[in-house]
Image (tube, grey):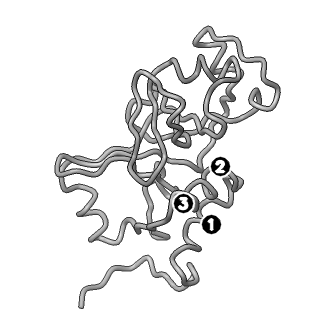
């Protein structure tokens, strides 16, 4: 929501990939870090020589486990990795190094976003924050998600995601109310 004051999340777009009675997990998809893929691949001792990917930023995925990598990518039944979560009707999130090894040699997912860290909520926490006007859920199709995450510049992803709500974002208030 526009009134979010937590610096980890203000103005953030989060792709929620898990939401159960135990809690929720997601990745911030619009906050690039100063680290690019070339630097990251050097640190994990993989050789990346695909020119368009070298300067691609690594994103701040959230404040939990910021030393751990998460790759958000389009689902492809012809590609499988050791540790992937395929979100029904959505994208795939992979945490195993084999996806980066495939990217390094040009056999990885065509469209992907690399993050360090994730956003996490305990049981009932996200629901409480939504009730307190902290978050807004924007339901979109897989195609719309891909458009926002992979085809929209990071600085425009918040506005693009919010545009799917069908009203002007400036009409929202940072104040909560109960009827």
The residues bearing labels 3 and 1 have C-alpha atoms spaced at a distance of: 12 Å
Q: Which residue is depicted at the point 66% across and 29% down?
A: 35
Question: Which label sits in the foreground, 3 or 1?
Answer: 1
**Residue 62, percent from left and from top:** 45, 41
Q: Are marks 1 and 2 in contact (CB under 8 Å)?
A: no
Query: Mark 3 highlights which residue?
Result: 11
- The picture quadrant where one finds residue 177 is bottom left
Disc with the residue nearer the chain's start (3 vs 1): 3
**Residue 15, percent from left and from top:** 46, 51
**Relative depth, front residue between 26 and 170:** 26
Q: In the rendered image, which quarter contains the N terminus? A: bottom left
Disc with the residue nearer the chain's start (2 vs 3): 3
Question: Which label sits in the foreground, 2 or 3?
Answer: 2
Query: Mark 1 highlights which residue?
Result: 160
The residue carrying pointer 3 sits among few (fewer than 14), some (14 to 19) or many (20 or more) residues within 10 Å by Cα, namely some
Q: In the rendered image, which quarter contains the C terminus? A: bottom left
The residues bearing labels 2 and 3 have C-alpha atoms spaced at a distance of: 18 Å
Label 1: element kind: helix
Label 3: element kind: loop
Disc with the residue nearer the chain's start (1 vs 2): 2
Query: Mark 2 highlights which residue?
Result: 150
Farthest residue toward the right? 51
Q: Is residue 97 left or right of residue 156?
A: left
**Residue 86, percent from left and from top:** 40, 41
Q: Which mark is residue 151?
A: none
């Amino acid at each position: 929501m526009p009134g979010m004051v937590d610096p980890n999340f203000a103005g953030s777009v989060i792709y929620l990939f898990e939401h159960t009675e135990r809690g929720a997990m997601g990745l911030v998809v619009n906050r690039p870090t100063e680290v690019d893929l070339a630097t990251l691949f050097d640190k994990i001792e993989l050789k990346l020589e695909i020119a368009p990917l070298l300067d691609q930023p690594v994103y701040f995925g959230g404040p939990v486990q910021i030393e751990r990598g998460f790759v958000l990518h389009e689902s492809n039944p012809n590609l499988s990795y050791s540790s992937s979560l395929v979100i029904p009707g959505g994208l795939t999130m992979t945490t195993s190094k084999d996806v980066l090894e495939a990217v390094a040699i040009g056999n990885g997912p065509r469209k992907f976003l690399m993050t360090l860290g994730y956003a996490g909520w305990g049981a009932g926490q996200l629901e409480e924050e939504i009730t307190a006007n902290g978050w807004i859920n924007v339901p979109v199709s897989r195609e719309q998600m891909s458009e926002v995450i992979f085809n929209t510049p990071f600085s425009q992803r918040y506005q693009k995601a919010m545009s799917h709500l069908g009203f002007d974002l400036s009409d929202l208030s940072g104040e909560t109310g109960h009827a």
